Structures are given as C-alpha cells and as structure tokens.
Amino acid sequence: MKQYDMQDDFTRRKIFWLLQRLTSLSLWTAKYDAFKIFASAYETAIRTWLPADPEPLPADHLTTIFEILSLYDEGLNELSRGRRFVWRSGQALASAFRKSAYLADSIYPYAEYWDRGGQIANYPARVDALARLLRASQFQGEGAATEVSGTSYNFSRLQAPDLLLDPDTYDYTFYRLAYPTFPAVLPAVPDLSGPVIYSGQTVPCDGVWEPVFIETSRVSEVIPLSAKLFRNNGCFNYFVKDTSAPNLEGYDSATYSATIIPTRWRLLWEDRRYVDNVVPDESQYFLKPSEATSPADRRVAEPLRTGDVCPVTGEWRTEEYGGKTVRVEAGKPMPDLLAADSIGERKVHWVTWHFVKST
C-alpha cells in the first residue's frame, strides 16, 4: 500500500473530488443503469438455463434484484431533490448498496466457487459474464456516504486515502473495478473555519468533513495568535446530516486489536447540490483518459516541486504560504516562493506547484 499524505495539497484535492463524485446523482444513476442491464440479463439466464450448463443460478436472487431496483427508483428520486437521508441506515440507497454488495459476493454460492461470503475460484463462463455485468454497477468507495452504525467502534468509512487512490486497492483477484480518470485541473479544497464537531455528536449538515487537531499552546491550552487553527488528522469523509460523527481507528500492537480514537471534524464543504431541482454538469466524473487532458497537459498531471523542470508553458499555482499563481516557461525550473513566516520575516520557501492551464 502506498502511503498517500493528507498534508499534500494534490492528495487533498483528489480525495475531495472523489468524495463529490461518489456522492453525485450522476454516479448513482450510472450504478442504477448498469444494475438494470445486469437484472435483465440475470432474469433471461434463469429462464433459459439449460440442463447441460453448470449448476443453475439461484432463482431466489430475482427477489433481491427486484427489491434493489425498487430501492434505486425510490432513492434516486429523493437524491435528485437534494435529500441525502437516503444514505442513512435502512434508507433506500444505503439498502441498495448493502443488498447489491451481498448479491455480488454470493451470486453463485456453490462450494467449488464460494466460501464464507466470497468467491474462491473462477466462475464458469456464463456465470462470469453475469458477475461482470453486476460488478459494472460498482465503484470503489461507493459506500462513502452511508451511515456508520451497528458497531460500538463507530469507525469512519475512510481511514486513509489509499483506499481511493492506490490502484492496487481496485484489484479484487477475480475482478477489478475501474480506476477513475481525474480532470486536468482539480478544484481547490475549501478552507473553512467550521463548524467543528466531535466524535459522537450529531452531524449538522451534509458534506465533506476533515478530522483535525486544534492547535493550542502546550502550556496554557490557549490558541496562539500565530498558529494555524486546524491541523489535519486523517482522511476526509462524507457525512449525512443527523448521523453521528464517527471515530478514527487506531491499532494496539500489544493486543493486535483496533482502538477507538475520538476526534474533531471540521466542515470543508456543505453539499447543497440538487436542492433547487437543478443537476449541474457532472460529465467530469466519467472522463476517459484521452478526454481528461490535452496531449501537452498529460505530462503535468502530477504536481512539481521547486527546482523541477517545467514541461509545459502555462499558469501554475501553489496553495502554500497563502497561495500564488505564476507563469512558467517550458524548460525553466519551477520557482520558489518568497513569503512571510509566522513572525513576519520574509523567507524563501520550496513549494509544490499544480498545473492550471497552458498559455
């Protein structure tokens, strides 16, 4: 597993964008459309299964499939109006997510192919074709907004950015989920001052939240005037209004067990999409690699540090030390940044630059 750093601006932008994508109406509509294709193919397979074929598919799955279709209908209707309670436990999209995940794991529950809730061998060709249709309706991290409940630990869905950013986590031995294509320019992560809630408290609004430390003086527990108020304490998560703010998960090496780490969460972005019955353009969530960037811009998908050679003439931006946008010529070294420190003294800093656009 790669250790992606939530202190890095580019990592933060990616996770922020992915959480918006995973909770978008467009992505859940795409899930529904793909599931309908699978449902039709499964119903046809049940009706046309031949004696010469392998063990028959469980006909009982059809009941579950029809339930999931109904849940999608109900949930998408509510989500299109900005009502995100559908991801709470027992509600439509949370139930559709849970039932379809169980169905995917138990689609062919014969001892040769399935054990303890998971696939252990390659399915016969005809079954594999159906399983692939079902997997086409799944996205890595699609349960990000579903309510955390049912355990005393109450751990957040995303404990680290690796689950969404490391390509290896998309590989599940017998199938692989599609890795997302990021747009050429990722939006900046908002830097709000609050509200701030603590694990166990009620979430006041839908949106993306960041676990944080609040910087205080070690002596007086007073926030110093020169301090940055919030310091990141882990991966962003998406919470739905009126749910309980979760904990972070620690690890006790002495007992080899998980530990509960209560934390503060601050709101980064309140989700107000669709409340006015208007769906914005969300085509960026389904880009193909060739559409994400121009041929020249593909060379600058990753950020550069001060001193790196600039590959494309254009505008570059850093969010560090107050932020700045500069124009850099191709072949020139990426610049440093002259900025004041906490006591007002201007110093040269090495920074990370992100490509904005060609000029």
Image (cartoon, helix red, strand yellow):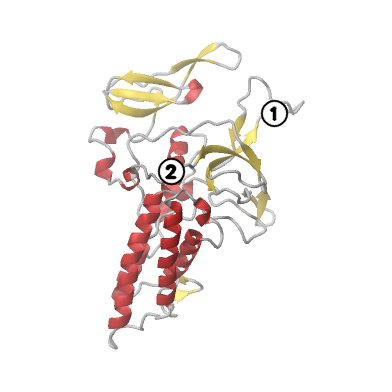
Residue most extreme to the front: 276
Q: Where is mark 2, residue-wise? A: 276
Query: Where does the image place residue 174, in percent across and percent down from the top left?
Result: 38, 65
User: What residue would you read off at disc 1?
Assistant: 216
Q: Which residue occupies the foreground of this view, 131 or 174?
A: 131
Q: Is residue 115 above or below residue 240?
A: below
State the image quarter where residue 357 is shown. Answer: top left
Whether residue 223 is visible here, answered yes or no, is yes
Q: CA distance from mark 1 to mark 2?
A: 41 Å
The disc labelled 2 sits on which kind of residue? Asp
**Residue pictured at 41% horizontal, 79% vertical:** 112
**Left or right: 90, with 283 as reference point:** right
* Residue visible at 46% across and 40% down in the picture: 16
- The foreground one among 18 and 20 is 20
Residue 74 on image: x %, y %? 44, 61
Rendered view: 232 above or below 288: above
Residue at 36% across, 84% down: 55
Name of the residue lying farthest toward the top: 345
Residue 60 picture quarter: bottom left
Residue 120 visible in the picture: no
- Give the mark, 1 or 2, whose residue is nearer the N terminus: 1
Task: Say left or right for 1 vs 43.
Answer: right
The quarter of the picture where the C terminus appears is top left
Rendered view: 124 above or below 271: below
Question: Residue reaching furthest left?
Answer: 295
